[in-house]
Image: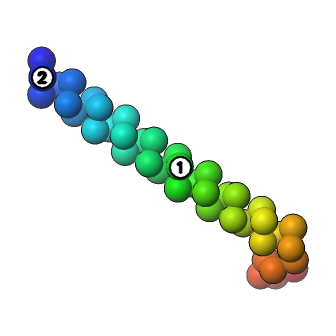
Amino acid sequence: MGRIRRAVLSTLAGFLGIALLIGLAACIGWSLDRLGWAPGG
């Protein structure tokens, strides 16, 4: 049971980390877009 639980927790942590990175990238991209720094106008 412990092994399965640990695998689920690590998977959830991975998904959380990816979601956090995507959110951060979206935030930075939006900020740059608002400031007019985004490539391609």
Q: Residues within 10 Å of mark 1 (few under 14, many from 20)?
A: few
- Mark closer to the chain start, 1 or 2: 2
User: Viewer-proximal residue, 25 or 41?
Assistant: 25
| Quadrant including the C terminus | bottom right
Please state the horizontal and vertical placement of residue 29, each as a whole percent of the image.
Answer: 72, 66
Please state the horizontal and vertical placement of residue 27, each as a whole percent of the image.
Answer: 70, 58
Find residue 41 and name its label. none
Identify the element where label 2 is drawn.
helix
In the rendered image, which residue does mark 2 sit on?
2
Look at 29% across and 32% down and name the residue there: 9
Residue 20 vs residue 29: left or right? left
Residue 22 vs residue 30: left or right? left
| Amino acid under disc 1 | Leu
Please state the horizontal and vertical placement of residue 20, each as a whole percent of the image.
Answer: 53, 49
In the rendered image, which residue does mark 1 sit on?
20
Q: Is residue 21 above or below residue 15?
A: below
| Amino acid under disc 2 | Gly
Q: Quadrant of residue 33?
A: bottom right
Look at 12% across and 18% down and name the residue there: 1
Residue 23 vs residue 12: left or right? right
Q: Is residue 35 above or below residue 22?
A: below
Residue at mark 1 to residue at mark 2: CA–CA distance? 26 Å
